[in-house]
Amino acid sequence: MPIRAHYIFVLLSLLGCVSVQAQQKADSLQLSQKVQEAYKIFLADPDSTIGIANNVIQESVVSSNVYFQGYGNYLLAKAYWAKGNYRLSTEYAFKALALFERTPYTHLWGETMLSLARTLIDLRNFKQANIFLNRTMNLAVTHHLNNLLADVYRERSVYVLEQKQYDSALYWADKGITLYESFSDTLNASILYGRKANIYTQLKDYKTSMIFNRKAILLDSLVGNKRALGIAYFQSAVNEYNLHHLERSKILLQKAIGLVTEIGSFNTLVKAHTLLADIYLLDKKPELAFQQMKFVSQLKDSLYSAQRNGQIQEMQSLYELGTKENTIRVLENEKKSQRLFAIFLMLGIFLLVLLIFVLWRLRHLQKKANEILSLKNRAIEQQKEEMHAQAENLQQLNQLKTKLFSVISHDLRGPIGNLQALLELVTTRAMSADEFITISHKLKANLNVTQSTLENLLSWSLSQMEGIKTEQNRFDIQMLIDEACVLMEEVAQRKNITVENTTANAIPVMGDVNQIQLILRNLIHNAIKFSRQDGLVSVYAQSNASHCQISVRDYGIGMTSVETDMILGKQQYFTKAGTQQEKGTGLGLLLCKEFIKRNGGALTIDSQPGEGTAVSFTVPLAQV
């Protein structure tokens, strides 16, 4: 009898260990989900990241999980850096480094050193920053961590840029872009494109800077990096200001101010309002300039106060953290004493449930086996059907891509060949300056079309790779239509076509602003393409119970029912020469269909040959 009791006790202990291990695994999975969520938003919403990271640290201290303690401190370092609080960023980075150093968590060890290096660069402590950069590069090379190596190149470009070593900064930025693009890491690639734009601005090569800024803005918009997007808009505004395009600079500054205000980036906000004041002075509006400089002064006072109060908050946070750690240790000891009692109680219940389960299992074992076999057979059949459907979709998509790239390669070869031939004539002096100017106007138009085709191709390819994220925001569709009409004025002027927005009132809608803007540009461009000389293109929006319908109307050559069916068909593309033999690939309409679907809308076409076309799509109304 004592021997039998001993075996029962051993069995109960083993069952208790299994239960504890299962609980620990569930807790680790929950913490992993939290840190992943916090890392995704630390640039756009650093305060939320700070809240999640503190929660992770508290939970990991209770479970003695060193990995998540270090990860939580690393997240705090990144979030405080995004807010510009370098004091706290450095402190939490050193805490994370103490936990990760010489552990199997090599990648996070390296990323923590990079976080310290970036903060030290911003504090202009270049000597210490260089030490951490070299240590991280050695770690990445030794362990073959290409992702970490790309991040080293990214921060190395900042390091040399702050020391005015522009050629080195471009070298490291290009190395980083090459690696990031091989990983399809659009977020970090866009950061380096913005950095190259900054380098060329400092070199006073504003036109080259604008090229890279456009790439950065496009990629930042796609990945939702609000911090980098705000900086990119500000950089574009600086370029336009230096090129004496004051109105464009003001528009870009307003966009930048909206974004950096949202995430609380004081430094960029101060620079933006200062530049806006300079523009108002050039516009001979001293009252508005004075208001901007007054606001800048208030921001600087607020930043100084925040930094001064930050020291008090920091000491209070450290005190509260120590108090919480003591409380956690006391609770942990109490929890250990209660755990044993809970285990025995749970095991008693478990044994009773186990007895019932064994009896039930013996009775229904055969029946359960038959049910499982039947379910597996049905699952296999369902998988076969799904695989067949996927194969058909892939075949259709592959055929579509083959046709698209065939057309695009043909259309791109012409303008590029023309440009090459023109440059050959210029370099050999076989063409006069007047002849060059005459031909270059038409060539510029062709290159503009080529650039639009490439931008559409990039957006479409990203959508097919699920690289585009649709963000639902509230905005006024009337203002967005005005902006699209302004952007298409240059294209319309070539055919002396009037583009007008006849929307009477503001209509608030919900959707992705950048995607709706792309839809409008493509539809207006098509309307101009198929309109006759001296024609009219009308854009208007009207709302019903739940949706807003936006229509682009032209009075050009129109389409047949067969052509409209091809446009509205699934995975079909349509292309047709314009009234002045303008060529196209049909890729813009594919993008429009994709983005309309992503934004919860529907596409309709009303057209008659010779009478014009009205292309309409819907967007959900914003709720009051």
Image (cartoon, helix red, strand yellow):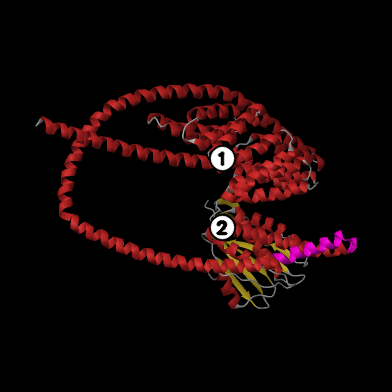
At 57% from the left and 64% from the top, the residue drawn is: 593
Dot label at residue 463: 2
| In this view, the mark in front (1 or 2) | 1
- Quarter of the image for the N terminus: give it: top left
Residue 429 forms part of the magenta stretch = yes
* Image: 41 above or below 360: above
Q: Is residue 182 left or right of residue 7?
A: right
Residue 575 lies left or right of residue 339; in this view the side is: right
* Secondary structure category for the residue under label 2: helix
Q: Residue at x 55, y 51 (%)?
A: 471
Q: In the rendered structure, which segment of residues is drawn in magenta?
A: 412-434
The residue indicated by pointer 1 is 148
Mark 1 or mark 2: name the one nearer the start of the chain.
Answer: 1
Q: Percent from the top left, x then y, of residue 144?
A: 54, 41
Q: Position of residue 241 (x, y in %)?
A: 77, 44
Disc 2 packing (10 Å; few <14; some 14–19; many ≥20): some
> For this view, does 322 lie left or right of residue 310?
left
Q: Amino acid at mark 1?
A: Leu
Instruction: Point out which mark residue 261 bears.
Output: none
Tag 2: amino acid: Ser
Residue 517 placement (x, y as % from top left):
63, 57
